[in-house]
Image: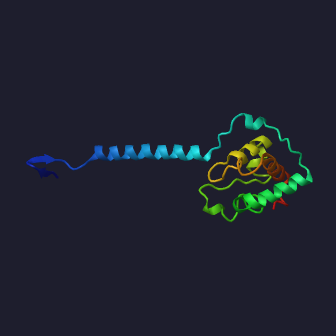
């Protein structure tokens, strides 16, 4: 089937056009995937793993860390620190499971401190919201959690 335009015959879009559309779609999809993957990964410096916790896990530090968790982390990470807080379902990424059997178990204190400090969407950075001591208290509190007593 052909159509006429100003006396010339033209062919309807065919296989070449469909391949062109598919190629554009594939490039856009691949680019979107790369962007999403880069947004979902933490990019810590090597020094984060080497940073030692200077704050002893005293009863005072644990109590302060628990208060910070309750005020700053609970709504997303949940009362059991398992990433199932009341706001978790509305976030673009699921909050991390901070229980002793979750993601945190394989991370150093320095790495946990760095993540708290720097944040990663949708989690805010706390380096300007909490003091260094408060962030270490939070690390101590998270390390003190047991599967049965996370609150």
The image shows residue 14 at horizontal and vertical percentages of 26, 47
Q: Is residue 37 above or below residue 65?
A: above
Name the colour scheme.
Answer: rainbow
Residue at the extreme right: 59
Left or right: 1 in relation to 17: left
Question: In which quarter of the view is residue 52 placed?
Answer: top right
- Specify whether 19 is left or right of 146: left
Left or right: 13 as drawn, with respect to 122: left
Residue 77 image offset from top left, x and y in percent: 72, 58
Quarter-of-image position of residue 20:
top left
Residue nearest the viewer, comparing 125 with 13? 125
Q: Residue at x 86, y 44 (%)?
A: 55
Residue lying at 83% horizontally and 41% vertically, measured from the top left: 53
Residue 73 seen anywhere in this rendered image of the structure: no
Q: Residue furthest bottom?
A: 86
**Nearer-the-camera pick, 149 or 66:** 66
Q: Quadrant of the C terminus?
A: bottom right
Q: How many marks?
A: 0
Q: From the top left corner, tell me how far across and down residue 73 is, in percent.
A: 73, 58
Residue 61: percent from the left, percent from the top? 87, 52
Residue drawn at x 77%, y 63% is: 79
Residue 133 visible in this rendered orientation of the protein: yes
């Amino acid at each position: 089937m052909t159509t006429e335009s100003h006396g010339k015959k033209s062919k309807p879009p065919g296989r070449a056009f469909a391949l062109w559309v598919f190629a554009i779609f594939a490039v856009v999809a691949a680019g979107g995937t790369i962007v999403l993957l880069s947004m979902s990964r933490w990019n810590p410096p090597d020094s984060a793993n080497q940073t030692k916790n200077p704050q002893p896990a005293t009863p005072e530090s644990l109590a302060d860390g628990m208060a910070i968790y309750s005020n700053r982390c609970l709504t997303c990470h949940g009362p059991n620190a398992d990433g199932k807080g009341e706001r978790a379902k509305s976030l673009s990424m699921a909050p991390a499971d901070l229980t002793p059997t979750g993601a945190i178990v394989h991370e150093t204190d320095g790495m946990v401190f760095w993540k708290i400090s720097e944040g990663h969407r949708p989690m805010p950075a706390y380096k300007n919201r909490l003091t260094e001591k408060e962030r270490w208290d939070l690390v101590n509190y998270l390390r003190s959690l047991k599967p049965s007593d996370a609150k």
